[in-house]
Image (cartoon, rainbow, N blue to C red):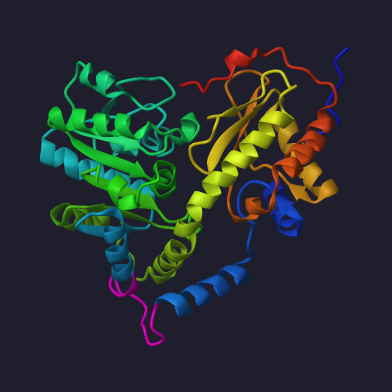
Amino acid sequence: MTQEPNVSPAPYQGADDRRFTLWRGSDRILSGPRPATLHERLAELGADARACVDPAERPDSYGDGVVATLERRVADLLGHEAAVFFPTGTMAQQVALRCWADRRGSAVVAGHPLTHLETHERRAFNRLTGLQTVWPTTAARHPTAAELRALDEPYGVLLVELPLRAAGFVLPDWSGLVELVAAARTAGATVHLDGARLWEAAAYYGRPPAELGRLGDSVYVSFYKALGAISGAALAGPAELVAEARAWRHRYGGQLNQQWPAALSALGALGRELPRLPGYLHQAQVLADALRRAVAAVPGARIHPDPPQTHQFQLWLPYPRELLAAATLQHAERSGDALFGTWWESGIPGLSMTEVSALAPSLSWTGDQVERAVADFLGRFGGAESAIPANAVEPTVH
């Protein structure tokens, strides 16, 4: 007889406030950053100002000053001629693709159905610019050079998201990536890198960001993901493209009077977090090893990818999302251990997924501590079993 999980679904109203309070007060955090209050973020911004700019530095005016300093820093880091700051990555992506489409005389972008462009931007590339996408593959991985060469439609831009988050933060091997880029160039196409997590991908390849960034004719990077800055993004590439991107940024409403808080936070985060990323990747592999042992007896549970290729990876468990979300909060309240972030439905009934992110709070955990804490968490589900076969939990494209 199947035992019912000892968890009551929690209402989502107020869940963010409850999580914020529990995570701030927790003894240990396994995944993600420790939440900060507004006053703490302001204090951090003050520390960034003291570390990064002269005491007499004035706030920027429409992108000069500290914003221009950040742009030069990013261009150097990514091995490109110039860079331009954007308030959001979505805006940076739209502008980059439309500029390249105009230059190539093609409104077709070769990409993947699991990219951020397709899944999290309300198809703005199509609605605002009239661009269309074609997919060399729908498998939950990057396309191969052979698949790109076999594409039976012309395209002007190849978009490569590094890593491909929705597929499990997966990356191609280095030689495969180089071959993919070469195949696009042979076809006369431009290569644009969606590098929202490119900093983290560089750690996996063991190469400086510039070596990875130069594979693309342009590259977008984010400042608020692993780096933990307030917000913002940058687009790097040839000076002529960046100049055109500035004009389109204005047209899209991204020409803000002052952007110094975001730019200053990004400068501080680049100096603070970039050197830590290889350590986060190593700790992600420690966490994955421990989680694999902890869920070994749970039918359908798995780590993906295994081993992780960045500091982030997926954990799949055969329980409903609502129960896992409630159990996560209840476990933090009871034990002082904040284990997991958001849980999502996987598309397979009864199977849910969370993203595990190894950041600074994760570094205090040993593998044995992870295994014991997760075993305690799973104990809340008693003997509940899943009929989902282990080979049925590959990421799917919808």
| Residue at x 77%, y 56% (from the top left corner) | 27
- Between 208 and 230, the residue placed more toward the observer is 208
Where is residue 44 shown, x and y percent of the image?
Answer: 55, 71
Name of the residue lying farthest toward the bottom: 56
Q: Is residue 91 left or right of residue 35?
A: left
Where is residue 323 shown, x and y percent of the image?
Answer: 75, 31
| Residue at x 47%, y 36% (from the top left corner) | 169
Q: Which residues are magenta?
A: 53-66
Answer with the quarter of the image where residue 6 lies. Answer: top right
Where is residue 173 shown, x and y percent of the image?
Answer: 37, 32
Q: Is residue 351 above or below residue 66?
A: above
Answer with the quarter of the image where residue 379 lies. Answer: top right
The answer to whether one can see residue 390 in this image is yes
The answer to whether one can see residue 10 in this image is no
| Residue at x 79%, y 31% (from the top left corner) | 378
| Residue at x 37%, y 78% (from the top left corner) | 59
Q: Is residue 82 left or right of residue 315?
A: left
- Between 376 and 232, the residue placed more toward the observer is 376
Q: Main secondary structure of the magenta part?
A: loop
Q: Is residue 217 above or below residue 106?
A: below
Q: Is residue 282 left or right of residue 77?
A: right
Q: Is residue 54 above or below residue 110?
A: below
Q: Would residue 63 be counted in the magenta stretch?
A: yes
Q: Would residue 82 be counted in the magenta stretch?
A: no
Q: Is residue 355 left or right of residue 396?
A: right
